[in-house]
Amino acid sequence: MTETANLPSTRSAAEDDLALVQRIVAGDRAAFELLMRRHNRRLYRLARATLRDDAEAEDALQDAYLHAYRSLGRFRGDAALTTWLSRLVLNECYGRMRRHARRENVVPMVSSNTADIDIEAMRPSDSEPPDSAVARAEMRALIERKLDELPDSFRTVFILRTVEELSVEETAQCLDIAEATVRSRHFRARSLLREALARDIDLASSEIFGFAGARCDRIVANVMARIDKHGESNQG
């Protein structure tokens, strides 16, 4: 083995993406499958955050990929591939939202660390106890519901910044907005999500270790049965 073979690769992610695009344009279908698998999670989350519907997000992502496949010959690497793909997905999502609006005549808004949650980490693992998996799934569903209630512009920025961990600069490029706008929307999204989760926690706190109803009846019945069984008396 030569000394050169032991040297780490210095090719950047942008160069890797450009090479992948060149393979696809040359007719390498397997390369396009690799591209989709590489970007699927991030782009699906972006579509889901925008459309607030699982099936609609899948359809939008598929249509965006088809558009990308037909347009990759015009990709020159002026922007990062992930940015270019993100814009295609957003354009598809916004187009769907406009079409739905026209059809329906609708005019399309705890602790300090509550919003800093990795939703992906809430997926149950094979080794996780069933009760823990259920609790994790319920928490994840709650956070997703609260995210769906955020205004569209805030929700999309939150997904890219907090969930996908894109930088302010990368998020600004994906959404074609100013970096200052990214910072203000992300701050507002975190605040709104934190407030929404805190309200649910406050409501749930009043019901912790619930006692009324069947549990109350059961305890009373059991005690009375024991009294009857042993003939206990309250007299000295």
Image: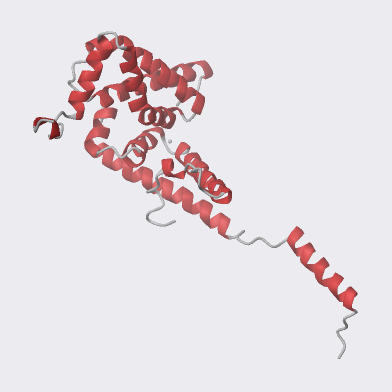
Q: Nearer the viewer, residue 10 or 8?
A: 8
Which quadrant does the C terminus fall into?
Answer: bottom right
The answer to whether 136 appears left or right of 66 in the picture is right
Q: Nearer the viewer, residue 115 or 16?
A: 16
The answer to whether residue 213 is seen in the rendering is no
Q: Nearer the viewer, residue 112 or 98?
A: 112
Image-based side of 143 in relation to 172, left or right: right
Quarter in which the N terminus is drawn: top left
Quarter of the image where one finds residue 65: top left
Left/right of residue 60 with respect to residue 164 in the rendered view: right
Judged from this view, the residue extending furthest toward the left is: 3
Residue 175 rendering spot, x and y as whole percentages = 29, 29
Give the residue displayed 52% in from the left and 41% down from the top: 141
- Res 89 → quadrant: top left
Question: By what rule are the colours in the image chosen?
Answer: secondary structure
Q: Is residue 8 left or right of residue 145?
A: left
Task: Provide residue 5's location: percent of width, then percent of height.
Answer: 13, 30
Count of numbered badges drawn on the protein? 0
* Residue at the spot 41% in from the left edge and 46% down from the top edge: 192
Q: Is residue 199 above or below residue 8?
A: below
Q: Position of residue 154 (x, y in %)?
A: 37, 37
